[in-house]
Image (tube, helix red, strand yellow):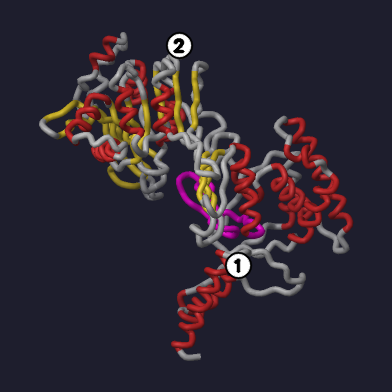
Amino acid sequence: MSLRERLQRARQEEREETLGRIGAVGDSRPMGRTRPRPDERHLRAQQERAPERLSVQPEPQEPQGKQEERELRILKPVENVSFHPPVKLPDDPHIGIKEKIHSRLVKEIDAEFLEQTSSAEDRQRLAREVQKVAMAVLNEEPLPLIRSEKTRIINEVIDDVMGFGPITPLLEDESITEVMVNGPEMIYVERKGRIEQAPVRFRDADHVMHIIEKIVSPIGRRIDEASPMVDARLPDGSRVNAVIPPISLVGPCITIRKFSREPLTTDDLVRFGTLTPTVVEFLDGAVKARLNIVVSGGTGSGKTTTLNVLSSFIPPDERIVTIEDAAELQLRQDHVVTMEARPPNIEGKGAIAIRDLVRNALRMRPDRIVVGEVRSGEALDMLQAMNTGHDGSMTTGHANSPRDMLSRLETMTLMAGMELPLRAIREQIASAIDLIVHQARLRDGSRKITHLTEVLGMEGDVITMQDIYLFEQSGVDEEGRALGRFRATGIRPKFLDKFEASGIKVPPGMFVDY
């Protein structure tokens, strides 16, 4: 075959791959007749074009003894999932059996009971029923299955019925912080700051869509071709984003940012190296002194976690109103009103934006307003709230540095459509914000608070700032972990008079670099 013919063949197979991912993936061919999946055809095309650069490693097999030692998940908690290097996972040989079990479940278990499993007792009862039906189907199979295969099939069916399919063990693994589904076959996780491929997969795109519907339906959200993107949350508060074709060319995709079952505390952040005890003491005083604080940082840098920790310093006798796109803050105080934005319905009506909620919060007699994140025109309403007696308010925003955060606030305020002069906007920002807490995710995956920066005011047309604390990275160790230290700049912030007015004592050496 000539080079031109090979290139034409490769291009044709790539087009077929794209069409196969966008279209339906259901396969009605009889069992026993198979054809290569698009990814396998693409792999062969790559081998023909550059065989010397390609090597495919076989998937490591788990010893049979270990498989037989595992017990059913309903009887024993799920252990941490082990991970392999990125490989193409084989087709599930037991799909037909699982479909038989699902069909039998539909016939034998009341649909209402399948949906009403909010209590632990109901869930245990449903798990026993599913196990009973699954064992009956497995015992009818002409080909005998070993114990480990039966256990795996039953666990996967239970995950489908009561959980979120093959990603259920990943969501239960507390060492995993993020789950990323790129179509039915490629699932990745973030563990300890590093991204790895998970050894699980969905049956097909319809299976992924079923799980997405299972996530978004209970909270009144929808996703379809007319509205192919959605933000949602899991019952434990984990943040979910889903996109589907036609905007996703690899099939339905899910991104889940998990949160700890128990909110992280300052002790946890000190242990992780995110900050130091001195910085904790300073931030505690800043919140109690009712400074207006903005937490800035990039995606995945830990802004929401830091906002949660800062909110824990708010005294319990204050009324807090929280406003979010998707509720995920975990405040421990009792006197908290939580409000959540709402997208438009199928007719394009009924949307309630964060900006509407911020304006409404001003009528609710709040002591503090906490906005999960400002992204648009709500920044203007947040600044006005901070400037009209609602001191101690907090929010987060995406930015690469404290100075960039101020520029982003200018841009977002202009998005409110008020036609304000740039100087007036900067004066609003300078008078409203006292402190910027900037957080970054470093190359090794660790999260650090890298800047604590005071906003001083205006000099001419420029907002002036000064750093109070900095994290200075000095390099990396042999394992690639960031080395560095937190240091005080030696500058005493001008807002210390608010500390004194609130009766907060400042240790003499708090702002001295030793």
Residue 319: percent from left, percent from top: 45, 16
* Residue holding disc 1: 58
Q: Is residue 373 left or right of residue 43?
A: left
Label 2: which secondary element: loop
Write the residue at 25% across / 19% down. 509
Residue 21: percent from left, percent from top: 56, 65
Q: Quadrant of residue 395?
A: top left
- Can residue 472 be seen in this snapshot? no
- Relative to 444, does residue 375 appear above or below in the rendering? above
Q: Is residue 216 left or right of residue 95?
A: left
Write the residue at 20% across / 28% down. 427
Q: Is residue 151 left or right of residue 366?
A: right
Dot 1 crowding, Cα within 10 Å, few <14, some 14–19, many 20+? few
Residue 487: percent from left, percent from top: 26, 31
Label 1: which secondary element: loop
- Can residue 400 be seen in this snapshot? yes
Span of residues in magenta: 177-204
* Residue holding disc 2: 317
Query: In which quadrant of the rendered image does the C terminus lie?
Result: top left
Write the residue at 80% across / 44% down. 130
Q: Amino acid at mark 1?
A: Pro
